[in-house]
């Protein structure tokens, strides 16, 4: 799984670079060094590096036996794999879904209600079970964000359509 | 001599700007927040600075920069607290500190580790500041005379140095950098006024908003990664009553601290070579120079002092290219550039002459911040250790909440929140695949400078101007070496690893 991720990232970056490179041909040309020159330069430089990384990852995938464990070789892992605790599956997925819903519901519910729900849901998801702590931390954050952003910085936080 | 007199006069003026409750409270707040951020494993100095940027919107530019630089400075020390007490470096640059610091704790002497790291950090920070002041002004004067071709060459050199971020995989670091450079081309072209790659989205006409991208790449991606890895346990440290070193013991470490500080400052100047590299090189240097090299890794005070002096002095070094050329020397200074831009401050060689209050106020604040670091470190060591026990189930949702509100506050626009989220996911995917994210930020930040200089240079002298001007050619050759060497070394190790044993 790790090797596949290692290959997917340069593939996506290469696709992005290719898309922008092709897009430069639709930019109007101007006198001197036009707006297309530098994007083409960066996109062209990206291609060989991405290809090298894709080929390397492909070789590793082909060389890896089908039932080799990849659980302990997660890139970026800093802890000793032998000591790492396997997290409950779906925890990150739940967190990401909660985050997406949070961002989508702020315009509707307003910043304060949406944030309170988000904080509660995600603290619970990450293992906090003490309701008093969850409520008090959420309220403390809401109070702090009101004082700092609305009162001190004069940033009006979204009020929410349901309250209007 | 006149220059020195002018410098001292301006510095005195800089100190006078700090004489007030506001600036002092700002520096104190920055130092405290920085120590906290640095002490918590999983929070990096760049992340701490990025998260704090939105809170500085309502502040004058001078105070905002002082606050953020204080955080940056203090965070490098903060990482040593948990490195010494529980062998969990709060920052990557404290990893070398843990080698000997934790051994001291196991020997029942955590106070020795904490004390030496504090004093070494303070002295290192002061030496880095002195070097910054002495070299940045003449360098800025020199840089003003640079032709755009030379400026482009310097930007390219800065970008090629990022291979150090790749931790052995230079190709990934270069891909990350080029990706950032490409992202920077999105928006209205500043010379021709042509819309580039905006996909019909009006908000993209002004380009990728830097602060949400920073917050997403540094903060959100780290949260996602740690949740995925299941790193939710919070190790608890205990600092019981323990002796601290005497003045004589500190005095014995003076040459190690001074040499390591100079090493750290010099390394900090090079873009991409930040506090982590500085601390390891200084540690190795101290071990080679030591009369007792066998003690390193067994609880050597010299080891702790070398690492901490270097990682703190690298802050001053990293600020040199930032203030004089607008080129960030590290991930944290890349975030600082974003903060400067938000406050309508353009970091370039003329900054010293156009905004002397900001520059000299910053220099003076570094001295004050180092003094406060010593103070808070001395009296608050037990407190910092306790605070690092904040449970991650509380911390991660709060970081996300700060990220969301911070991104929204940039322009009161949801597009920035979406941008933060997208960059958080991009950063997470990249880090999962072993790609560093700091070069993406460097690419976004330096891309504008590089493109502007490139196009100006070509307009003035044609495409061959980069090789006909000796300075530009020399810098580009060094950049080529800086780019090619790590790739060649990596290729050579691969060949050695795959060749059959004799």
Image (tube, grey):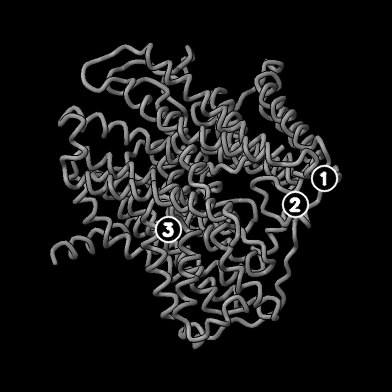
Question: Relative to B46, is A24 above or below?
Answer: above
Residue visible at 46% across and 69% down? B282
In space, the residues marked 3 and 2 are separated at their CA atoms by 30 Å
Q: Residues within 10 Å of mark 2 (few under 14, many from 20)?
A: some
Tell me the chain of label 2: B
**Frontmost residue, B104 versus A60:** A60
Residue visible at 78% across and 44% down? A68
Where's residue B11, x and y in %? 27, 60
**Frontmost residue, B113 versus B440:** B440
Pointer 1 and pointer 2: residues touching (CB < 8 Å)?
yes
Instruction: Provide the residue designation for mark 3.
Output: B315
Residue visible at 34% across and 27% down? A38
Where's residue B150, x and y in %? 23, 42
* Label 1 secondary element: loop
**Residue B256 placement, left or right of B353:** right
Where's residue A163, x and y in %? 70, 18
Please tell me whether mark 3 or mark 1 is closer to you in this view: 3
Instruction: Provide the residue designation for mark 2.
Output: B391
Tell me the chain of label 3: B
Specify the farthest residue to the bottom. Answer: B248
Q: Earlier in the sequence, mark 3 or mark 2?
A: 3
**Residue B114 placement, left or right of B199:** right
Q: Residues within 10 Å of mark 3 (few under 14, many from 20)?
A: many
Quarter the N terminus of chain A occupies: top right
Residue A128's tag is: 1
* Label 3 secondary element: helix
């Amino acid at each position: 799984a790790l090797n596949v991720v290692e290959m997917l990232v340069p593939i996506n970056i290469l696709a992005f670079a290719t898309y922008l490179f092709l897009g430069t041909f639709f930019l109007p040309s101007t006198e001197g060094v036009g707006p297309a020159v530098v994007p083409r330069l960066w996109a062209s430089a990206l291609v060989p590096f991405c290809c090298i990384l894709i080929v390397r990852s492909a070789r590793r995938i082909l060389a890896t036996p089908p039932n080799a464990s990849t659980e302990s070789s997660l890139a970026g892992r800093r802890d000793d794999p032998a000591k790492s605790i396997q997290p409950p599956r779906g925890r990150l997925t739940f967190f990401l879904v909660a985050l997406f819903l949070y961002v989508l519901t702020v315009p509707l519910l307003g910043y304060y209600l949406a944030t309170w729900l988000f904080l509660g849901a995600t603290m619970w998801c990450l293992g906090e079970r003490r309701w008093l702590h969850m409520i008090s931390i959420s309220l403390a954050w809401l109070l702090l964000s009101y004082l700092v952003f609305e009162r001190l910085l004069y940033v009006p936080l979204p009020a929410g359509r349901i309250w209007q | 001599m006149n220059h020195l007199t002018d410098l001292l006069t301006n510095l005195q003026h800089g100190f006078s700007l700090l004489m007030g409750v506001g600036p002092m409270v700002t520096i104190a707040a920055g130092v405290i927040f920085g120590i906290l951020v640095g002490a918590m494993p999983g929070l990096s100095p760049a992340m701490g600075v990025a998260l704090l940027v939105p809170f500085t919107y309502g502040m004058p530019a001078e105070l905002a920069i002082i606050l953020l630089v204080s955080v940056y400075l203090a965070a490098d020390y903060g990482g040593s607290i948990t490195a010494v007490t529980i062998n969990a470096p709060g920052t990557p640059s404290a990893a070398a500190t843990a080698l000997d610091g934790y051994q001291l704790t196991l020997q029942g002497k955590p106070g020795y580790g904490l004390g030496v790291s504090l004093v070494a950090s303070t002295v290192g920070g002061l030496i880095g500041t002195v070097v910054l002041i002495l070299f940045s002004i003449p360098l800025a004067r020199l840089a003003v005379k640079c032709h755009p071709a030379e400026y482009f060459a310097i930007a390219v050199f800065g970008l090629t140095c990022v291979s150090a971020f790749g931790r052995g995989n230079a190709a990934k670091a270069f891909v990350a950098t080029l990706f950032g450079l490409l992202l920077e081309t999105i928006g209205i072209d500043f010379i021709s006024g042509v819309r580039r790659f905006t996909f019909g989205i009006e908000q993209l006409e002004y380009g990728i908003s830097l602060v949400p991208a920073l917050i997403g790449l540094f903060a959100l991606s780290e949260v996602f990664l740690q949740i995925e890895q299941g790193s939710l346990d919070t190790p608890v440290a205990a600092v019981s009553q323990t002796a601290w070193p005497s003045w004589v013991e500190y005095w014995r470490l003076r040459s190690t601290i001074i040499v390591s500080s100079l090493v750290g400052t010099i390394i900090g100047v090079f873009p991409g070579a930040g506090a982590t590299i500085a601390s390891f090189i200084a540690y190795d240097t101290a071990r080679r120079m030591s009369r007792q090299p066998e003690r390193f890794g067994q609880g050597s005070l010299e080891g702790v002092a070398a690492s901490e002096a270097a990682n703190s002095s690298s802050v001053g070094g990293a600020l040199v290219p930032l203030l004089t050329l607008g080129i960030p020397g590290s991930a944290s200074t890349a975030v600082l550039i974003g903060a400067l831009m938000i406050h309508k401050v353009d970091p370039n060689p003329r900054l010293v002459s156009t905004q002397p209050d900001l520059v000299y106020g910053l220099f003076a604040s570094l001295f004050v911040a180092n003094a406060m670091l010593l103070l808070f470190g001395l009296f608050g060591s037990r407190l910092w250790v306790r605070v690092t026990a904040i449970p991650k189930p509380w911390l991660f949702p709060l970081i996300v909440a700060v990220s969301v509100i911070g991104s929204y506050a940039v322009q009161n626009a949801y597009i920035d929140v979406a941008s933060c989220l997208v960059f958080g996911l991009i950063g997470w995917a990249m880090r999962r695949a072993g790609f560093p994210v700091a070069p993406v930020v460097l690419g976004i930040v330096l891309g504008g400078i590089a493109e502007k200089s490139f196009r100006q240079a070509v307009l003035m002298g044609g495409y061959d101007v980069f090789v006909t001007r000796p300075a530009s050619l020399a810098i580009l050759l060094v950049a080529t070496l800086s780019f090619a060497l790590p790739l060649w070394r990596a290729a050579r190790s691969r060949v050695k690893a795959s060749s059959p044993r004799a």
